[in-house]
Each structure stands twice: as structure tokens, then as C-alpha cells.
Amino acid sequence: MLVPYPEAHDSNIGKRIVKDTRPVNLDLTSVKFPLPAITSILHRISGVAIFFGVAVLLYLLQLSLASEAGFEQVQEYFTNPLVKLVVWLLLCGLLYHLIAGVKHLIMDFGIGETKAGAKTGAIVTIALSVVAFAVAGVWIW
């Protein structure tokens, strides 16, 4: 059999044997993430939580707008501390996602793209989020 390009079938041509000394660590619990990475991961997690939590919020909105009895039923739901907690957690996710999203938009303008700037932005994001969570908690309870 004639092969037009015999080197195309030889898998060792062009390969060098190099010892790979890079560490392989797949245990994410043993990795120390920097603060900007943690805030970025939390931004993604809050986005997923919002995606699924919107269904709960839309149900409560639909029920409250359907009739006067539905509105009273939603008010009765809010006497349950578990419902208040779920709504507060969803609101916290929404607020965090909003604050972290604004930080990302600011970074798109070239502000805070350095390592120090990213850390400062992460600290500001967490600080503003904690304040927003407290305000939301006072508002709901």
C-alpha cells in the first residue's frame, strides 16, 4: 500500500519526550483561591441561584396579582420564617450578582485590571454586598 505522506502515520515524528514536573492537583478543597477568584465564582453561583429562584418569585408575584385572596395568601406565606429566609437568600443572590456585575463592567472600562486592583475590587464587592444583605434583611424582617 502506498501512503502519500508516511510521516502522517508515524505518531512519534515531531514529538519530544519532556518530563512534566507541573503539579497535578484535582482536589479543589486543598487549593487556596485568591479573593478575586472567590468573588468571581460566587458571581457565577449567584447567577445560577437567580435563574432557579426567579420561578419562586414569579409564583409569589402571580399569586399576589391574581386576586385579593391570593394577595392575602402571599401575605400569610410571609409570616412563615422559612419563606422569609428563602426570599431573603434569593434577594441576597440578586444583590450580590448586581454588585459583582457592576464591578465587572467597571473592569471592562480598564479600571482595576491589575492584581492589586482586582483585590481591591473584590474587597469593595464583598463590603457592599454585606451592607446590601443587611439592608435587605431589615426590609424583609
Image (cartoon, rainbow, N blue to C red):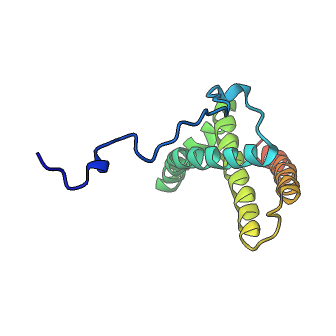
Residue 69 appears in the picture as rendered: no
| Pick the front one: 133 or 25 | 25
Q: Position of residue 53 (x, y in %)?
A: 56, 45
| Pick the front one: 4 or 130 | 4
From this view, report whether residue 86 is shown above or below residue 51. above
Q: Position of residue 20 (x, y in %)?
A: 62, 34
Q: Quadrant of residue 111?
A: bottom right
| Pick the front one: 6 or 26 | 6
- Does 69 sit left or right of 132 as displayed? left
Instruction: Give the tally of numbered discs.
Output: 0
| Pick the front one: 43 or 129 | 43
From this view, report whether residue 86 is shown above or below residue 70. above
Residue 50 appears in the picture as rendered: yes
Which quadrant of the rendered structure holds the N terminus?
A: top left
Q: Look at 18% across and 50% down and name the residue there.
A: 3
Q: Position of residue 61 (x, y in %)?
A: 54, 53
Q: Look at 86% across and 60% down and name the residue there.
A: 117
Which quadrant of the rendered structure holds the C terminus?
A: top right
Q: Look at 77% across and 72% down and name the residue there.
A: 110
